[in-house]
Image (spheres, helix red, strand yellow):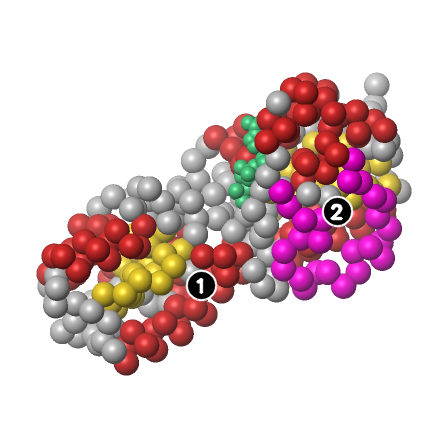
Amino acid sequence: MKYEIKCIGVLTSGGDSPGMNAAIRSVTRAAIFNGIRVKAIYRGYKGLITGEITEFQTQNVSNIIQQGGTILKSARCAEFRTPEGRKMAFDNMEKHGIDALVVIGGDGTFTGARIFAQEFNVPIIGLPGTIDNDLYGTDSTIGYDTALNTIVEAVDKIRDTASSHERLFFIEVMGRDAGFLALNSGLASGAEAAIIPEKKTQLAQLEELVKNGFRKSKNSSIVLVAESELTGGANALAEHMRTEYPEYDVRVTILGHLQRGGSPTAYDRIIASRMGVAAIEALLEEQRSVMIGIVNDVIVNVPFTKAIKDDKPVNEKLLNVLHMLSI
Ligand code: ATP
């Protein structure tokens, strides 16, 4: 029997990312366009459990496409990890007449969604909202491009002082265990090296660069470092440098949360808009437990299990480009 969807719930969960609002707008308007009602759920899974739910009309998502963050707020919710918490969430869905969910977040959000969908037979579609770009099955996640541009802007500014004082800067960027932000911001800002968790030999290359005296040809040096236990982070690397190469004036900048904020780039607004529409289309086509991705400019539906578990490799050729251009 065809499962008719009359009303969807939309929520944002996990770390916020620029473009989430564009995704909320798109999901809301695409649903209403198709005659489906929309319930906005606040604070991620937490709001589903506590019943922070309100109906959205098209005007509720006016004037948000250009805003960073998420108007629905985001939260981490330990209770949703328990069967009792998820039962309360399901009861609230029934109470509010919600037939299906669109969840916008990262791998944790999809892990929770997959379990919830299985337990209660709920149709759920995911949209990849994270600056880390660490989800398999999409070339880019919503927010990644904006974060990349924010980092490059910051590095350009740091380069001015690095160059004036002839310093070696280690700049730590987000990404968890993924090196996309560090590698691509390194390329875009003309950095000397990028230390990423996926490639252990980068550290050896950095030593080689230092030993060859990259100060000879340059009056400043920038190294992008992905925050990760695998890289050790910028502080640990800087400490190592200070001990081994005291002739360098070493400084550290940890960019932190400024990478998550700001108005989304055109690219992030566009993919968020396309993915939101695709989420509603997927629900109408009776797709379940899939993340919407865009690969080679084509919309794809990726099962949650694949999006979460499969590795998304960085393009190692880019490391060679960076290396070659850092002479
Ligand atoms: P980001 O990539 O920005 O960190 P995320 O979606 O991975 O985003 P998490 O905090 O890992 O962020 O997950 C968001 C929420 O998903 C959690 O707070 C929790 O409510 C739910 N969740 C995560 N893992 C599980 C799980 N194993 N079972 C049930 N719910 C989960």
Q: Can residue 306 be spotted in the picture?
A: yes
User: Taking 249 as reference, is 120 left or right?
Assistant: right
Q: Is residue 291 above or below residue 169?
A: above
Mark 1 nearby-residue class (10 Å; few <14, some 14–19, many ≥20): many
* Residue for point 63% across, 56% down: 69
Looking at the rendered structure, the kind of residue marked 1 is Ile
Cβ of mark 2 under 8 A from ligand 1: no
Q: Are the two marked residues, 2 and 1, in contact with CB atoms closer than 8 angstroms? A: no
Quadrant for the N terminus, please: top right
* Residue for point 58% across, 52% down: 17
Tell me the chief SS of the magenta region.
loop
Gap between marks 2 and 1 measured at Cα:
28 Å
Q: Closest to the observer: 70 or 210?
A: 70
Q: Closest to the observer: 308 or 89?
A: 89
Q: Read off the residue under disc 2.
A: 27
What secondary structure is marked by label 1?
helix
Q: Closest to the observer: 151 or 27?
A: 151
Image quadrant assignment for residue 255: bottom left
Of mark 2 and mark 1, the one earlier in the sequence is 2
Residue 155: where, in percent of width, then height? 39, 68
Looking at the rendered structure, the kind of residue marked 2 is Val
Ligand number 1: quarter of image: top right
Mark 2 nearby-residue class (10 Å; few <14, some 14–19, many ≥20): many
Mark number displayed over residue 102: none
Mark number displayed over residue 151: 1
* Magenta region: 51-75
Cβ of mark 1 under 8 A from ligand 1: no
Q: Can residue 287 be spotted in the picture?
A: no
The question of residue 53 being in magenta is answered with: yes
